[in-house]
Image (tube, rainbow, N blue to C red):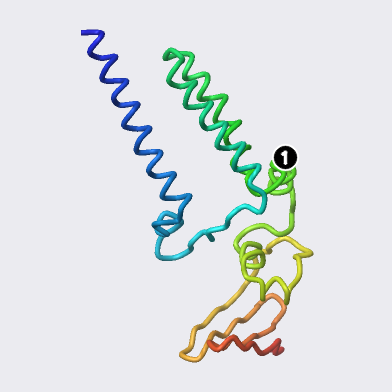
Amino acid sequence: MRHLFALECYAMRKLILLITLIFLALLASDLYPGLRGGSGWRWPYLLPDNWTGALVLGILLIVYLVGVFLLRRWQARTWAFISAAVLGVAVVGVHGDAGFLLFTRTVSPVQTGASALAVRVMAEVRDALGYATTAEQDIGVNLQRFEGGTLFKDVTVGQVFVLLVDGRAFGPYSQ
């Protein structure tokens, strides 16, 4: 009976591994863009500039999987706990120096949140605005949509901006 249970666990591990590998292949190849987000925000599909980090991540994933299959149950739990931290750092390292990226994303008061993502992803916005000099602020803002664009009102400083659907922007207008 115990031998049958061990075979079932081994078969379940193989099934989970197969499903995970299929998911990772779909995610890496971008065959199904829906994996990057729903109907609202979508994470940009961005290939790394330097493939060394991706290679290190791949090697670490293989070492992790071999360790999971070779170790006993209690050892595998410890292995998974330690590997989670190592693999997390390796994932961040795909797009640059992991230590620097983790540190700056954690302690930096500027260039954070959704607005920073828009500045980084959209070249025109980045060129027009440059880099943030302050953190995002929780301020009073009114937004109203029209057929031809959007009216944006910053209540804190009393300025109004008009953003047209063709890409033109007007303002600031004082209240």
* Residue 43 drawn at (x, y percent): 52, 59
Q: Is residue 159 above or below residue 126?
A: below
Q: Nearer the viewer, residue 96 or 142?
A: 96
Q: Nearer the viewer, residue 152 or 33?
A: 33
- Relative placement, left or right, of 127 versus 65 is right
* Residue 146 drawn at (x, y percent): 48, 88
- Relative placement, left or right, of 46 versus 10 is right
The secondary element bearing badge 1 is classed as helix
Q: Which residue is mark 1?
A: 99
Q: Nearer the viewer, residue 77 or 70?
A: 70
Q: Nearer the viewer, residue 132 or 88?
A: 88
Tell me the quarter of the image containing the N terminus: top left
Seen at 76% across and 70% down, the residue is 130
Mark 1: amino acid: Gly
Classify 10 Å Cα crowding around label 1: few (below 14), some (14-19), many (20 and above): few
Q: Is residue 121 above or below residue 57?
A: below
Q: Residue furthest left?
A: 1
* Residue 154 drawn at (x, y percent): 65, 78
Seen at 71% across and 89% down, the residue is 174
Total labels drawn: 1
Seen at 66% across and 64% down, the residue is 120
- Relative placement, left or right, of 10 versus 172 is left
Q: Residue furthest right?
A: 133
* Residue 99 drawn at (x, y percent): 72, 40
Tell me the quarter of the image containing the C terminus: bottom right
Seen at 46% across and 90% down, the residue is 147
